[in-house]
C-alpha cells in the first residue's frame, strides 16, 4: 500500500536505500520447481551495474546478489525469495554538503514534504539504486517466462538528438548504447562525449519488445496489459512517458490507417503493439518509454535550501551522463514482471 | 484481481456490458459526510453522453444515474455507494450480423482468446459504455477533492492533424471539442466533417491539468503519482500513450534544460509536470494522453471470422468519429480517482 | 480497503443498506463458461429468507435476485456479475423512534463513532440484510466448486442450551433448525417457544463441513486456509468464535492424542479439521462457529441516547429469536467463497 | 497474494526458512518519525527466543535483529524497514533422516502436495521460526501504538489440564508461563515436567487484551476488527480456534445476558470483547486463542513415507513441550499489527 510492492500474483517488494546497509527484494508467488541460483540473478544484475558503460558513474559496486530464502537445491520452493545486494562503495560524505539543499529534478523536496524527514545520503530511497531489487526480481520472472518460450529485449531508439534509423538486432549487442543501428550508436558516442565535457546530461527513448506472448493475457477494464505496462514503466524514476504500438503517432492517424487488418495468419501491421482492448493478441508486444536526462549535472542551477532560501548548486558527485543504457535492463525487468503476473492470472481463471 | 477494481483506499468497481441490463459502479471508501445526490452525478455523466457532440454516435441514452446505497439524507455515510445507469436504447440486432466476425482494432478477438466466450452485443464489456461507471465515481471523487480546493480540467490539444497553438481557458467551453484555441477548434470542425464523409475516424491528444494539488501526494517506488496516472489513463480503451510534464519531449532535452529551477516561490518551469520522484511538488499536475482513432469505420477492412476464414467488414452501426471529446471527462474522472486515493493514503500516514 | 470486498481472485464486493433501495453484490473473477442463471441464485437465497422459519422475523421479503451483468446466454463470461435484490417491505418508521438511541449489542454506537453519521433505518449497513449479497455470491462460488465435485453443508450443533448428540445427515433436512439430531431438534423447538414468550433470544453453534477438497489448497503463513475461514466466518455479524477441527478442545489434548496418525489410505482421525500448516490435507474440512444471541430483544435494557443520557429500551420491531438457522447458509457461502478463491490461487501457481 | 504479506496500510512481508540463511520481514507503510532502533526490536524478539523457558527447545539462537533499511538517525523514514535475523544454530542433519517421512500434525505432507517440493530442513517455511519476522514487525507496530497510548498484553489462561482461576496482572511476569494466577502456574510446572518425561506435549489457551483502543477502529462487513484478529491469530501455526469476548460461551447465553448494557460511563459488562458490529467500542479488546499441542513428540506415531508406505516415527530433535509461552508474544505482535493497520485506515477516512 505504501508503494513498495508490485504485482498481484507474482508479487515483489523492494527495500533499501542508496547508502544504507543494502538493497533487496522479496519475490512472493513464484511457482515452485523453477531452476534458480545466484548466478542467474547475477547475470541480469550485471547489466545494470555502474561503471560498465561510457554513460555511467564511476561508483564501483560489485553488486553481488545473495539469495536468502525460497530456493532449495537450486529450485524455487514456492516460498518467498529474498535477494539482497549489500552496499559497499557508498561515499555518504560526498552528500553531506548538500544535505540541506534541494537538488532540482530530484525528490529531495518532495520526500521532505511527504515524510518530514529524508535520508539525504545519495538520494536515499529515491535513488536509482532501488532498481537493483527490480532487476533481481526480473531475473526470476524471466526464468518463469522462458519456460513459456517468451522472450523480451530492449533497445535504445534515441539518445539526446540522435535516433536509430534502422533495426539490426545483432548491432544491439555490439555497442554500449544497446542501439540496433550502428551508425546511430557512433553518433551517440560523440554526443555523450560532448555533453560530458559540458557537465550536462542526456535523455532518450527505449523500446521494449516481447515475443511469443500468447493471446489472452491482460485483464479487461483497469488491469489492461498496457495499463500495467504503463504503470510498471512510469514507476521507473527517469521515465516521463510511455506508449504502446503506434503510441502518440496513433493520435494523428485515421482509423483506416491505425487499425491492424486481420488475416488468417495474424495481423498485417502492428499499430496496436500486440494489445487489443487491454489483452494480448498474439502479436509482438511493443512498448516505448521516454527517459528524461539525469538531473544531477555539473552545470550550476538555481535552487533553495531546506529553509527555503535561494541558493545555487553544482553537483560534483559521481553521476551518469544518461540513465540509458543502464535503465534498459530495468525496463526489461518491469515488462517481465507484468507478463509473469498476467500469465499467472490467466492460469487462475482456466 | 480481475481488473474491474481501481484504487486502494478510494476504491471503485465497475460492472456492466454495453447491451446488458445496465452499467454501474460501486464506490467503496468514500469518506462520510460528503454532500452527495443524483444530480451531482448526473451533471458529470451528461458530459460523456452520446448524442451531445458532432463527433459522437446518434445512440440516444438518457444515462440517468440512480444512487442505490451509501448516501443518507444527502450525505455519504462511509458505506459503499452503488450507482447504476440502466441501458435503454441498445440495438443488439445491429450487432447480430457481426457476431461471428472479429472487428479490427476491437477486443472481439482477444476476449474470445481469453474467455472462450464473449458477449458480442455492442462490444459487451469492452465497450466504452463501461466508462459510465468511471465517470459516476469520478463525480464522487471530485466532491471530495473540492473540499481540498483541488480543481481538474481537461482540454483537447490535437484532433487528427489539427493542434491547438494557444491556451485560452475560456475558449475551452465555447467549442464542442473542448479545445482551448478557437482557431484550431474551427479547423477541427472541418476535419471532422470531411472524415465523416469518408467513413473514417480520428484520434487526438488530450491534456489533463490539476491545480492546487498539495505537495506530498504519491507513494515512492511503484505507486508513484505519475505511475498511477499512467495506469489510470492507459486503462481507458482508446488511449495508446501517456506522458507527464515535458513527456516524450524530455527525451531530447539536456538536464540543464529539463530540470525545473527552484526559487523560494516555487519552480521557474514545469517540465516535471508537478511530480518529482513520483510525489507531487505543489506545482500544476500536467498529463497528456494519445487517443487512437475509433476503430469502427464504414470503410471496408480485411479481417477473419470466428473460424479464422478471411473476410471483409464495413461497420454500419452508430459510432463516434472520434473518442474526443467524450473521452475528456473520462480522463478527468481517472485523474480525480488517483488524486483522491493518494490524498487518503497521505492522510493515513500522518 | 473499506472492508466491503472479500477474496483475492474470486472477489466479491457487497453493497446496500437494510432500508435503502436494495442490496447486492459484484462478483469479480468468476471463470467464464460456468452455467449461471437467476434461479440458481434464487435457490440459495431462499434458504436465508426471513419468514421461512420458526426462529425468524415476520418481515416479508420475496428477495428476488436479478442478474445485471456478467452472464450471457446462461453462461458466465468472465466479466463482473452484478446481482441485486430490491428492498420492498422496509418499515423505516418502526425505527424512527429509536433513531437517537443506541441499541445494546448493535453497531449503532460504533458506526456513529466511526463515521459521525449513520443510517439508523433498520441498522443500515450493519444489518444482517447485507448477507444477501454474500449468499448470492456464494451461489456462484458453489457452481464453480460443483465442477470440482466439492460439496459443502452446514448443520446446527447447538441452540441455546440444547446440543446435538448424534449426526444423521438425513435428519438435517427434516427439521427447521438444520440439526442432524432429531431428538435435539425437538428440544430446540421447545426452547425457542419458551424464549419467544420471554421476549429474549438465543445463540448457538454451527458446523460447516466441506467434502472432496483436494490437498494443496491454502497459502502458507498469513493466508492459511484456516486463517481465511476464520476471517470469512468472523466477519458475519453474529459470530463470536471460530474453531477448526478439534478447535478449543485441542488446547487440553496431548500431542499424542491430537496428532492425526497417517496411514496409506489417509488419516485415522481428523483433529486437524482437514488442514495442516494452513493447507488442505485431503480430509474433510471441519469448521465451527459460535453464534451470539440476537441483540434485539423485547426485554427492557439499559442504554444511552445519542447525547449520552441514560435511558432504557425495549425493542418492539420484527426480529428473529436466533440467527440460527438463517445464518447457516451465510456460513456455507463464506466457506464456498474461501474455497473457490484458494482453488484459483492454486491453479495460478501450477 | 501467496500469503506471505499481512496488513493493508501497515503491511508486512515475512520471508525465510528454518534452516536457510536467515529469517526476516519487510515492514512497509510505517509512518515516518517513529523512534526506532535495533534494541527496540531485540527486546520484543527476546521474548520469543528458544531456550528461555521450561517448555522450550534447547536450540540456541541468539536471534540478533539487524535493521537494513527504513531507519535513519534512529527514526523511521516512511520507507520499507527490512529486519533480518540470521540463522546460526541450524542442525539440518538431524532432519535428514526424516526427509522422506511425513511427520503427523506437521505440514510436510501438505507442502509436498501443494508445491511438489519442500525444504525438509527443520520444517522449512512452515517452521515456527517464521514468526521471528512477525515479532520484529510487531515491535515496530507497538512503537506506533504507544504514541496513541494503546497497550497490549497477553496471558496464559490454560496449559494442558490446568486453567487460571484468578487474574493478577503482577503474577503474569513472575512465572515462566505468563499466567496471571500463581497457583495455576505452579500446577502448570508440574504438568510440564510430567509430560516431558512421557515424551509428549501440551496445548493451552492464551488471552490477548488491548487497552485504550479508541472507538471507531474496524471496517464494516468483511474487514471487521474481530474478523481481522481472527485471521491474524489463526494464521499462527499452532492456533486452532479464536474467540472474541464471551466467544463460544455466548452461544449458550440469552440475548438479555449477552448484551452489554450501556451507561453514560461506558458498558456494564464486556461480552462483546470491545467490538460491536466489527468496530471497536472503546472498551477493552479481549481475544482468546486455542493453541494445539506441539506435534513433534518422542512417542512413536503411525505415518507414511513420501512413497506412501506405512511406517512409524518418533521425533528425536530439540522441540518445545508447548508453544506456550513462546507463542504469547507472537499473538501480541499479530494483535498489534491489526490495530495499527486499522488505526491508519481510520485516519485515511477522516
Image: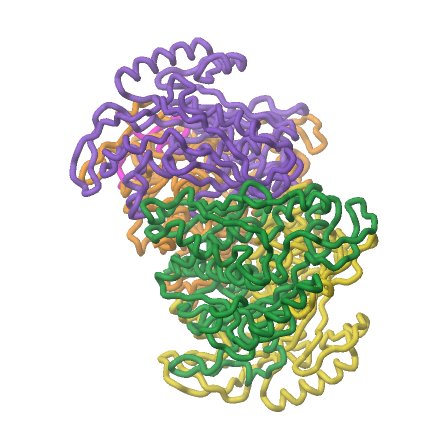
Chain colours: A green, B yellow, C orange, D purple
Q: Which of C157 and A183 is in front in this view?
A: A183
Visible residue check, residue C78: yes
Q: Residue at x 37, y 81 (%)?
A: B308
Q: Nearer the viewer, residue C163 or A266?
A: A266
Q: Which residue is drawn at 38% across and 12% down?
A: D189
Q: Is residue B339 magenta?
A: no
Q: Which of A50 and C253 is in front in this view?
A: A50
In this picture, residue C120 sits left or right of residue C338: right
Q: x and y percent of residue B57 in the render?
A: 61, 79
Q: x and y percent of residue D318 in the render?
A: 32, 25
Count the numbered circles shown: 0
In this picture, residue B338 sits left or right of residue D13: right
Q: Residue at x 38, y 81 (%)?
A: A265
* Snapshot quadrant of residue D39: top right
In this picture, residue C349 sits left or right of residue A235: left
Q: x and y percent of residue D156 in the render?
A: 45, 20
Residue B337 vertical placement versus C339 (above, below): below
Q: Which of C251 and D237 is in front in this view?
A: D237
Q: x and y percent of residue B183 in the render?
A: 78, 82
Q: Residue at x 17, y 34 (%)?
A: D311
Q: Is residue C159 magenta?
A: yes
Task: Please give the range of residues in magenta.
Answer: C157-173
Visible residue check, residue C325: no
The quarter of the rendered structure image containing the C terminus of chain B is top right
Residue C119 vertical placement versus A204 (above, below): above
Amino acid at each position: 500500500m505504501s508503494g513498495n510492492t508490485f504485482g498481484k500474483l507474482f508479487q515483489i517488494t523492494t527495500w533499501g536505500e542508496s547508502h544504507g546497509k543494502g538493497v533487496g527484494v522479496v519475490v512472493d508467488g513464484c511457482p515452485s520447481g523453477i531452476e534458480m541460483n545466484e548466478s542467474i540473478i547475477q547475470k541480469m544484475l550485471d547489466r545494470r551495474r555502474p561503471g560498465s558503460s561510457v554513460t555511467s558513474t564511476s561508483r564501483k559496486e560489485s553488486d553481488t546478489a545473495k539469495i536468502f530464502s525460497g530456493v532449495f537445491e537450486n529450485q524455487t520452493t514456492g516460498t518467498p525469495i529474498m535477494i539482497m545486494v549489500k552496499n559497499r562503495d557508498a561515499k555518504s560524505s560526498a552528500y553531506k554538503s548538500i544535505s540541506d539543499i534541494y537538488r532540482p529534478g530530484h525528490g529531495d523536496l518532495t520526500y521532505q514534504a511527504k515524510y518530514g524527514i529524508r535520508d539525504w545520503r545519495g538520494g536515499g530511497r529515491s535513488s536509482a539504486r532501488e532498481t537493483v531489487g527490480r532487476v533481481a526480481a526480473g531475473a526470476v520472472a524471466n526464468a518463469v517466462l522462458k519456460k513459456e518460450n517468451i522472450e523480451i529485449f530492449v533497445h535504445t531508439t534515441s539518445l539526446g538528438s540522435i535516433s536509430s534509423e534502422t533495426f539490426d538486432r545483432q548491432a544491439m549487442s555490439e555497442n554500449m548504447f544497446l542501439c540496433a543501428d550502428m551508425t546511430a550508436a557512433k553518433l551517440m558516442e560523440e554526443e555523450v562525449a560532448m555533453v560530458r565535457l559540458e557537465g550536462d546530461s542526456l535523455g532518450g527513448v527505449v523500446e521494449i519488445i516481447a515475443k511469443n506472448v500468447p493471446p489472452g493475457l491482460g485483464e479487461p477494464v483497469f488491469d489492461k496489459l498496457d495499463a500495467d505496462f504503463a504503470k510498471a514503466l512510469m514507476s521507473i524514476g527517469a521515465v516521463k512517458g510511455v506508449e504502446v504500438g503506434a503510441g502518440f503517432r496513433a493520435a494523428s492517424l485515421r482509423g483506416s490507417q491505425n487499425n491492424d487488418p486481420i488475416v488468417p495468419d495474424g495481423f498485417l501491421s502492428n499499430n496496436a503493439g500486440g494489445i487489443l482492448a487491454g489483452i494480448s493478441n498474439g502479436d509482438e508486444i511493443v512498448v516505448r518509454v521516454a527517459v528524461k536526462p539525469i538531473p544531477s549535472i555539473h552545470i550550476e542551477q538555481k535552487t533553495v535550501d531546506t529553509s527555503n532560501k535561494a541558493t545555487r548548486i553544482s553537483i560534483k558527485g559521481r553521476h551518469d551522463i544518461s540513465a540509458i543504457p543502464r535503465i534498459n535492463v530495468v525496463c526489461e525487468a518491469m515488462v517481465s514482471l507484468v507478463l509473469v503476473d498476467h500469465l499467472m492470472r490467466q492460469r487462475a481463471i482456466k
